[in-house]
Structure formats: structure tokens, C-alpha cells
Amino acid sequence: MSKLNSEIQDIFQKQGVFPITTSALDGTPNVVPMTFVKVLDEDNILIVDNFMNKTRKNLESNPVMAISIWDMENGKKAFQIKGKTSIVDSGKIFDEAKAWVAEKMPSLKPKAAIILKVEKIYNCTPGPNIGQEI
């Protein structure tokens, strides 16, 4: 299983908007821009559900998600992260997600915290290693 190393965690801290992809059971893709996304630890990513509609429905029936990240300034690196999700709407992680959102945008009322358990990370940086799992 791939880990969110320090290089990847640094990219997360710098990126403002994250393309999040899911799909319905019939394979219909869905991609949305998300801003409340951050690394919890080397194995997990937090995505806050403030407005999810199709994304949430997809995750309830097909819990697979991918996130694309990039840093075009320092080394022009890019990665795709894939894994399975869990939806959390109570408890410590959800309370922390609500506090994070309240600090940045108090008018929003999070519906849930989505935890992405990292399973695979792929190099998307142009070059000889593009597409390789790291």
C-alpha cells in the first residue's frame, strides 16, 4: 500500500482546489472541485462534505475515490491518489472537520467527513516514470 510521504503532503498543503472523482455503479464518472481537503496522516485524507450531491450518492453505493494533486512550481510534480472511502457524520473526526470549516467559512454547515484510505498513488509527472505506482 502506498503512503502519503512528505513530498506529497507538502503538495497537499500548497494546493487550493482538488479534483475529486467518483463513479456511479454503472460507471458514470463524476468529478468535482473541492477545497476542504487535507492529509490526516500518511494513510488517510479528509474531504469535508459541505455540498456533495452526486458525489455522496456515488460514495454510498461505490466507495472508491481518486484525487489529483500537482505542484507546477517546484519540480512540476503530479500524482493521482486512489482508495476507498468511509463516511463519518459523528464523532471526533467529524467534530474536527466542522471546526476546520467553521474557522475558514463559518456560514457552511458540513454534512459529513469523508475519509479516503489511501491504497495506491501514481506518478503523473511527465517523464519516464509517468503512470507508475509509487
Image (cartoon, grey):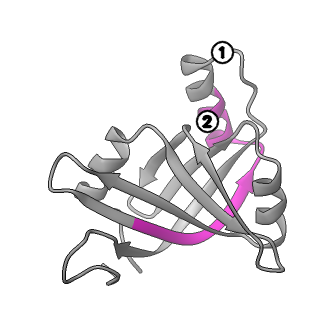
Spatial separation of the CA atoms under disc 2 and disc 1: 12 Å
The image shows residue 34, relative to residue 54, as above or below, that is above
Q: Is disc 1 placed on a helix, strand or loop?
A: loop
Examine the rendering and report whether any part of residue 58 can be seen: yes
Left or right: 99 as drawn, with respect to 119? right
| Res. 97 mark | 2
Q: Nearer the viewer, mark 2 or mark 1?
A: 1
Q: What are the residue bounds of the magenta stretch? A: 80-98
Question: Which amino acid type corresponds to the residue marked 1 in the rendered image?
Answer: Pro
First in residue order: circle 2 vs circle 1: 2
- Where on the picture, by quarter, is residue 30? bottom right
Quarter occupied by residue 108: top right
Mark 2: amino acid? Ala
In percent of width and height, residue 87 lies at 74, 55
Residue at image position (78%, 45%) is 89
Left or right: 111, with 118 as reference point: right
